[in-house]
Image (cartoon, grey):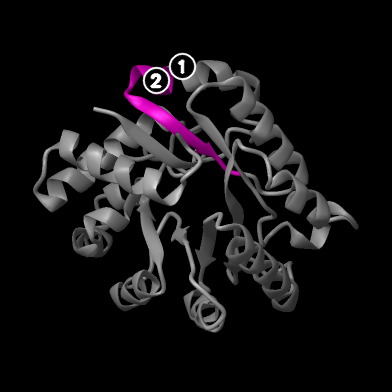
Amino acid sequence: MYLFDTHAHLADEQLLPVAAAVIERARQAGVTRILSVGTDLVSTRACIELAEGHTGVFASAGIHPNHVAQAQEGDWDEIVRLAQSQRVVALGETGLDLYWKDTPLPLQQEYFDRHIRLSQETGLPLVIHQRESAREILVMLREARQRGALRGVMHSYTGALAQAEEFLALGMHISFAGMVTFKKSDDLRSIAKTIPADRLLVETDSPYLSPEPFRGKRPNEPARVAHTAECLARERGVSPAELAAQTTASALALFRRAR
């Protein structure tokens, strides 16, 4: 059984000092590919360095919506340049966050639009962060879809079924993290059952969102994506091996450079 953790923050300070050991534990757990997600210029560079140094690790390049206010002049131009790296397979983490109030929405929207346009220019898929912002994200994706095709993933999905259906119609994949394993996440599990197999992904969002039976224990790490996959397999009525094969195939179709 081989798994692809499609969203891990290996450059986070909780994981970076022990990244080699974390990656090895993931391999031992059957996680053969990891997407290390950038959240600003510094972490993007670190993710690329990790990807260049470890087989099966790939990077994304981007600036998180909660970090765009701290971006320096020239940071975006450097993200655009780094996106050309062969170890970069996606753009982001981007999107919108209306839970935290310290980054103006217009600035978040400006940077989200930059990521979307770069995705449409390069063909690299988007890694989209959504927190209390589904309506606003859908508005921007609908507008962008008028310009051309969209590719990407709604990461760590916790939204409504109707929203998931529209994200799918717009070309997105849907990824589930540890929250889908929580005892009170019945509604989320019911949504996960409906996602087409070729659009379903799994992730850890490590070092956050540890799945059961590790809920609340940090740091989370890619090896634990197996617990999320097993939960989804039970809900969807397939074997863990089949779920792993389906989600890995979906991830490879989306992240085309991750070979």
225 over 77 or under it: above or below:
above
Q: Pointer 2: residues within 10 angstroms few (<14), some, or many (20+)? A: some
User: Which residue occupies the foreground of this view, 63 or 125?
Assistant: 125
Task: Specify the farthest residue to the right.
Answer: 73
The reply to whether discs 1 and 2 touch (Cβ–Cβ < 8 Å) is yes
- Figure quadrant of residue 230: top left
Residue in the image at 36% along x and 77% along y: 166
Task: Specify the farthest residue to the left.
Answer: 237
**Left or right: 177 in relation to 122:** left
Residue 142: in magenta span: no
Amino acid type indicated by mark 2: Arg
**Left or right: 175 in relation to 256:** left
Residue in the image at 13% along x and 45% along y: 234
User: Which residue occupies the foreground of this view, 145 or 156?
Assistant: 145
Q: Name the residue under label 2.
A: 27
Q: Measured from the top left, where is residue 101 in percent x and y?
A: 68, 70
Asked if one can make out residue 213 in the rendered structure from this viewpoint, the answer is no
- Figure quadrant of residue 187: bottom left
Q: Pointer 1: residues within 10 angstroms few (<14), some, or many (20+)? A: some
Q: Measured from the top left, where is residue 60 in percent x and y?
A: 60, 45
Where disc 2 sits, the SS reads helix
First to last magenta residue range:
25-37
Amino acid type indicated by mark 1: Glu
Q: Mark 1 points at which residue?
A: 24
Where disc 1 sits, the SS reads helix
Residue in the image at 67% along x and 39% along y: 85
Q: Could you tell me which quadrant the C terminus lies in?
A: top left
85 over 124 or under it: above or below:
above
Residue in the image at 36% along x and 17% along y: 28
